[in-house]
Image: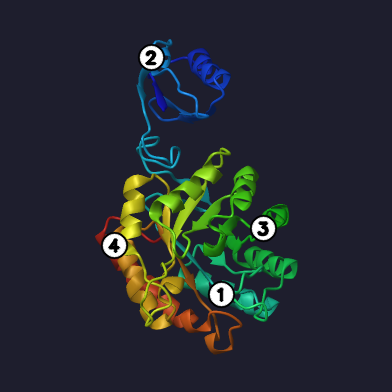
Amino acid sequence: MIVIMNPQATMREKSAVIAWAEDNGCTVHLSEGSERAVIGVIGNGRPLLREQAEMMAGVERVVPVLKPFKIASREFRAEDSSFPLGNHTVGGEELIIMAGPCSVESRSQIIETAHAVKEAGAHVLRGGAFKPRSSPYSFQGLGEEGLQYMAEAREQTGLPFVTEVMEPALVPLICEYADILQIGARNMQNYALLHAVGKSQHPVLLKRGMSSTIEEWLMCAEYVLSHGNTRVMMCERGIRTFETYTRNTFDINAIAVAKHLSHLPVIADPSHATGKWEYVAAASKAAIAAGADGLIIEVHPRPEEAMSDGPQSLKPEKFAKLVQEMKAIALAVGRKIEA
């Protein structure tokens, strides 16, 4: 349930409510708004007496949260969540563009790409140092060496970077380098990993599982949020269907539904959603029109030589053209893409 405090509630009164909830074995999340404080009380299976909370000093009203995803829901937080990332803000009026190769293949490749995507208008560099692959014989990434190259690219361009983390033991290492931890589609329901990235307090990009419902996706975000880590971005990257002309089916509905159900920012991944560079531009524009707060797009200077996902990667010049086209779509829906 959510305990909404009076605008005049004192810190002592807020602390009393928090102590009452914790004494009853509940987890508490305090959200200080511009006008009033909201205290989220997550139960432990035992019934809580709503009437007791309503009678406490400083309490305006108590609202039950009916959704299974408590902290992620609009019932817990009505306004959109946002947080700073580098010189930009995720979840605000501005759209965030993340771009880069699927995998970090060499120092020269990632640094060349970083400069190209920054010049085109990207705000965040993407690149995989640890790669989960369907085949054990495919390129698995450069590991920490790849992280070092990404860090050097950040130093040269000023772009923060996002990279995937695959297991809990790797979270501390990747936190030393990366600005955003990505949970890939295959690991969306890796609960030990979700706990670990939640505890890290690092920004998290949570990709939707390839066969997961929207509710399952939001429940995984709840794992991260339950540790007080509020810097969570949802990422729609397409789901598995019977269609064979694209890699996945881009669930444009999920963007609108997630924005309706949750206050968390939603990022779209048109590269994995379509699997073919020819369709990335159209899917990107559709995502912005549907309400996405940003995009993550694969860009490679020589896609034909890419060690992974070359067919869905844009060349830098095509990406630069797309960014200019997306600016017009953003303006049409009351958003903007900053340089």
Residue type at numbered disc 4: Ala
| Residue count near mark 1 (Cα–Cα under 10 Å), binned few <14, some 14–19, many ≥20 | many
Under mark 1, the amino acid is Pro
* Amino acid at the residue labelled 2: Glu
**Residue of label 4:** 289
Classify 10 Å Cα crowding around label 3: few (below 14), some (14-19), many (20 and above). Answer: some
Name the residue furthest front. Answer: 46
Q: Is residue 263 above or below residue 39?
A: below
N-terminal-most mark, 3 or 2: 2
Which residue is found at the position 56% from the left and 50% from the top? 203
Mark 4 burial class by Cα count in 10 Å: few <14, some 14-19, many 20+ = many
Using the rendered view, name the quadrant where residue 337 is placed.
bottom left
- What's the distance in space between the residues labelled 3 and 4, CA to CA? 34 Å
Q: Residue at x 64, y 46 (%)?
A: 200
Q: Using the numbered discs, state the Cα–Cα distance from disc 4 to disc 1 in whole angstroms.
A: 25 Å
Q: Residue at x 41, y 55 (%)?
A: 266
Tag 2 residue: 51
Q: Residue 210, image x and y in percent?
A: 46, 65
Q: SS for tag 4?
A: helix
* Of 260 and 87, the residue lying toward us: 260
Could you say whether the residue bearing mark 3 is in a helix, strand or loop? loop
**Residue 86 seen in the current view:** no
Say which residue label 3 marks: 167
Residue 112 relative to residue 14: left or right:
right
Among the two numbered marks 4 and 1 on one chain, the one whose residue lies closer to the N terminus: 1
